[in-house]
């Protein structure tokens, strides 16, 4: 058991010094090569009976601005072990650390470290009892302890340690009789509050990155505000946000999981809206404004990934097509492939090619509302006429099909058969806290506000 604790503490130490593990690379990258301007496709197909507002008079014009995706961090193997020279062998076990690459197996890692194939097989056999080796993901760091053999060049495998997921450590250990045993440990995680604020200079996404806000938290923020905010038109240079959120940290103080947003505040054109996370006694969790009104609405104002919307301000190259008599929808400029969400719960009424709209989806919601999404690159799996969808389900991907000169989402809200301007729409809101719940909530936001004030003070002190 002695090796065990050494290996474990060593693993913790190395892990603590390796923050890159906590920043998973984005997998939804859009190749920059797709940014080339597409020529408008001339289509004569019409279907006026099904599409009361289609006059085919407009051509949606976008000069695409594709946001470059961050390059995934490319760390080389950190290999402090490797084959051991028989001369001048130290008696203490050597440590080796490997970063799992795509297509890697435990066997390959162990053989690379110089372990005998038979030892490797027996260790993996023991491991399989607590962990499915197929779950091994690229990016996982595997820590090995190797005991140099006095005569041969082949070291003995003493232990394997790795973090299987943010909450679980796995350890394989050579017993005194030469057999291997494997154990899983729950990692001790502590919730901590973190703070972020940023002023938007070029885009919300960049502001968030600069402020060091983890992308999961930034996504949470934009999802929360996408009920009310049109992220293409409502966000201006100088607007800002401020957030308090939870992160789970391990024993070394490294954040391993992002928790919940606790307070989210956005100031748009001088108007500040603050939302607070609150759990009612019945277990319902939502975000509410200071009056106890839920942030949820029946339809999203921004039915796409707002972090990927190209900034609509400060550049003459990005004209914003707003709602008018000819252009009866709202456009969101985003890179090709950006997911498009169902604005609300409903049933798919039309899904497929539709004249100048290109690939098109229309959803029927309650209350006489429909929403439509045009110029899509393609539809998501399972999206066909008659399918039921939930709010924010991915239904398709931004493209430039139909009469369009660049990738964007054309979004329409249709009320009682007529396209209406989503910007002026008043929508029914969700839950409202009352009575005792409201009193509990007010008490809760008092505490959160104190925490926010403390963070502000600390940040101000640092800046001075
Ligand atoms: Zn449009």
Image (cartoon, grey):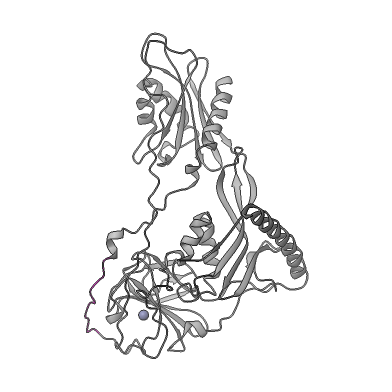
**In the rendered image, which quarter contains the N terminus?**
top right
338 or 234: nearer the viewer? 234
Q: Is residue 212 above or below residue 67?
A: above
162 or 47: nearer the viewer? 162
Q: Is residue 202 left or right of residue 252?
A: left
Q: Is residue 33 above or below residue 365?
A: above
Residue 194 visible: no
The residue drawn where x is 27% and y is 79% is 403
Residue 456 x/y as whole percent: 66, 58
Q: Is residue 221 above or below residue 256?
A: below
Q: Which residues are magenta?
A: 36-45
361 or 225: nearer the viewer? 225
Circle count:
0
Q: Give yes or no for residue 299 being in the magenta stretch.
A: no
Q: Quadrant of ligand 1?
A: bottom left
Residue 389 x/y as whole percent: 46, 70
Q: Is residue 377 above or below residue 147?
A: below
Q: Residue furthest top?
A: 151
**In the rendered image, which quarter contains the C terminus?**
bottom right
């Amino acid at each position: 058991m002695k090796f065990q604790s050494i290996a474990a503490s060593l693993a913790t130490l190395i892990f603590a010094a390796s923050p890159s593990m906590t920043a998973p690379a984005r997998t939804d990258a859009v190749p920059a090569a797709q940014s080339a301007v597409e020529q408008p496709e001339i289509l004569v197909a019409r279907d006026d009976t099904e599409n009361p507002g289609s006059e085919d008079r407009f051509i949606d014009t976008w000069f695409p601005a594709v946001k470059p995706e961050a390059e995934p961090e490319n760390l080389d193997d950190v290999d402090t072990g490797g084959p051991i020279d028989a001369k001048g062998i130290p008696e203490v076990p050597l440590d080796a650390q490997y970063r799992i690459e795509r297509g890697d197996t435990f066997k390959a890692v162990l053989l690379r470290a110089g372990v005998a194939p038979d030892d490797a097989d027996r260790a993996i056999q023991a491991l399989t009892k607590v962990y499915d080796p197929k779950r091994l993901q690229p990016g996982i760091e595997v820590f090995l302890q190797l005991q140099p053999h006095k005569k041969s060049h082949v070291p003995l495998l003493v232990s394997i340690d790795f973090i299987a997921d943010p909450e679980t450590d796995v350890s394989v250990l050579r017993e005194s009789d030469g057999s291997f045993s494997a154990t899983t440990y729950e990692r001790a995680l502590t919730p901590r509050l973190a703070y972020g604020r940023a002023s938007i200079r070029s885009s919300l996404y960049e502001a968030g990155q600069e402020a060091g806000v983890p992308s999961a938290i930034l996504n949470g923020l934009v999802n929360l505000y996408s009920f009310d905010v049109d992220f293409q038109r409502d966000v201006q240079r100088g607007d800002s946000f401020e957030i308090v959120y939870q992160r789970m940290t391990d024993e070394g103080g490294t954040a391993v999981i992002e928790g919940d947003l606790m307070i989210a505040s956005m100031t748009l054109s001088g108007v500040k809206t603050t939302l607070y996370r609150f759990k009612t006694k019945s277990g319902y969790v939502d975000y509410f404004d200071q009056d106890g009104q839920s942030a949820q609405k029946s339809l999203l104002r921004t039915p796409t990934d707002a972090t990927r919307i190209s900034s609509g301000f400060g550049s003459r190259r990005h004209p914003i097509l707003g709602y008018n008599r000819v252009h009866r929808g709202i456009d969101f400029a985003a890179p090709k492939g950006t997911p498009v969400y169902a604005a609300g719960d409903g049933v798919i009424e039309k899904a497929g090619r539709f004249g100048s709209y290109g690939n098109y989806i229309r959803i029927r919601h309650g209350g006489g509302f429909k929403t439509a999404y045009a110029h899509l690159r393609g539809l998501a799996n399972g999206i066909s006429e008659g399918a039921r969808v939930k709010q924010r389900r991915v239904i398709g991907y931004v493209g430039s099909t139909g009469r369009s000169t660049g990738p964007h989402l054309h979004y329409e809200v249709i009320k009682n058969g007529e396209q209406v301007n989503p910007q002026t729409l008043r929508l029914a809101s969700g839950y409202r806290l009352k009575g005792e719940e409201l009193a509990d909530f007010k008490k809760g936001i008092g505490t959160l506000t104190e925490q926010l004030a403390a963070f502000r003070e600390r940040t101000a002190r640092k800046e001075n």
